[in-house]
């Protein structure tokens, strides 16, 4: 069985440098960065580089952000990093689109169910209690 020689970290670095590993890795990195800047420049229709990337993205976001109205409040900030903590997530006034859609669908189902329950002989109070709706709303739909 061949014995594997004990090689130190310094020896590995020297061996990798000797075969040009670090130079090739740097060339590959430079090529990827070149492609990234070209792609970003095409996406934003302007020359993008390391020094102007943040300013360009901030300007484009603020130009396209008109603010979002949620429960009569205007939100002027967005969290573009969903894994980071955000004060917006703590705001109880913000209602997600999913919740609004679900609530709307549930209300429609309840309204569509009222005539069926009437045909089964339930009165206004029974229907309101069964569907957890105000009596006035049930009366309005029944009329």
Image (spheres, helix red, strand yellow):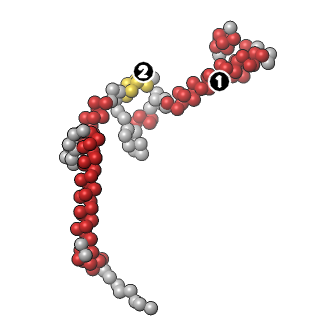
Q: Pinpoint residue 33: horizontal percent, then vertical percent.
A: 26, 54
Location of residue 77 (image quadrant)? top left
Q: Residue at x 25, y 35 (%)?
A: 59
- Label disc, if present, on residue 36 of the rendered structure: none
Q: Pinpoint residue 46: horizontal percent, then vertical percent.
A: 22, 40
User: Where is 132 relative to 62, above or below?
Assistant: above
Residue toward you, 10 or 44: 44
Q: As drawn, is 48 to the left or to the right of 96? A: left
Q: Is residue 5 visible?
A: yes
Q: Residue at x 29, y 77 (%)?
A: 12
Q: As drawn, is 114 to the left or to the right of 100? A: right
Circle 2 residues within 10 Å: few <14, some 14–19, many ≥20? few
Marks 2 and 1, Cα distance to the nearest angstrom?
27 Å
Q: Residue at x 32, y 82 (%)?
A: 7
Please name the residue that numbered disc 1 is placed on: 109
Q: Residue at x 28, y 47 (%)?
A: 39
Q: As drawn, is 29 to the left or to the right of 86? A: left
In the rendered image, the residue lying farthest to the top is: 143
In the rendered image, the residue lying farthest to the right is: 121
Please name the residue that numbered disc 2 is placed on: 72
- Quarter the C terminus occupies: top right
User: Where is 140 relative to 98, above or below?
Assistant: above
Q: Pinpoint residue 16: horizontal percent, then vertical percent.
A: 27, 75
Q: Is residue 126 visible?
A: no
The mark total stands at 2
User: Where is 104 relative to 56, above or below?
Assistant: above
């Amino acid at each position: 069985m061949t014995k594997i020689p004990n090689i130190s970290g310094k020896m590995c670095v020297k061996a990798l440098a000797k075969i040009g590993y670090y130079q090739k890795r740097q060339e590959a990195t430079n090529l990827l960065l070149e492609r990234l800047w070209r792609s970003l420049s095409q996406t934003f229709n302007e020359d993008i580089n390391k020094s102007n990337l943040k300013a360009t993205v901030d300007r484009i976001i603020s130009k396209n952000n008109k603010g979002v109205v949620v429960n009569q409040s205007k939100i002027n900030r967005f969290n573009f990093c969903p894994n980071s903590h955000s004060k917006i997530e703590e705001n109880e006034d913000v209602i997600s689109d999913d919740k609004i859609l679900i609530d709307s669908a549930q209300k429609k189902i309840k309204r569509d169910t009222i005539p069926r329950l009437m045909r089964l002989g339930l009165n206004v109070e029974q229907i309101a209690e069964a569907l957890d709706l105000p009596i006035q709303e049930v009366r309005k739909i029944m009329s």
